[in-house]
Image (spheres, rainbow, N blue to C red):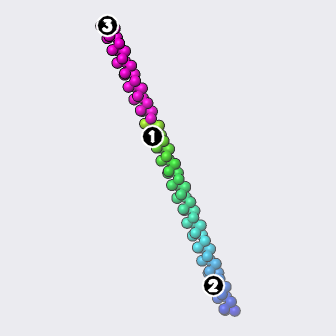
Amino acid sequence: EAEEEEEEAEEEEEEEAEEEEEEAEEEEEAEEEEEEEEEEEAEEEEEEEEAEEEEEEEAEEEEEEEAEEEEEEETEEEEEAEEEEE
């Protein structure tokens, strides 16, 4: 009887140890998934920021080009006006 009780106690201990191990593995997996999700989110945010920066740069370049064109047109008009005066 004492042997049986001892065996049962050992089995229980083993089961508990297995359960604890499983729980620890599940927790680890959950943490890894969370980390992956956070990394993905951070990457997405970075990509969005880069896209916004590119858009802003393009808009600035366009504005500069337009300003240059306007300046050139004004210069041409002034030159034409001067030529006409002469």
Magenta-highlighted stretch: main secondary structure?
helix
Distance from disc 2 to disc 1, alpha carbons, whole Å, reads: 64 Å
Distance from disc 3 to disc 2, alpha carbons, whole Å, reads: 112 Å
Q: Quadrant of the N terminus?
A: bottom right
**Secondary structure under badge 3?**
helix
Residue 54, by quadrant, is top left
Q: Which residues are magenta?
A: 58-86
Residue 23 coordinates in the image, percent (x, y): 60, 70
Magenta-span inclusion, residue 75:
yes
- The numbered mark at residue 53 is 1
Residue on which disc 2 sits: 10
**Secondary structure under badge 1?**
helix
The tag earlier along the polypeptide, 3 or 2, is 2
Mark 3 residue type: Glu
Residue 56 coordinates in the image, percent (x, y): 45, 36
Residue on which disc 3 sits: 85
Mark 2 residue type: Glu
Residue placed most toward the observer, 39 or 55: 55
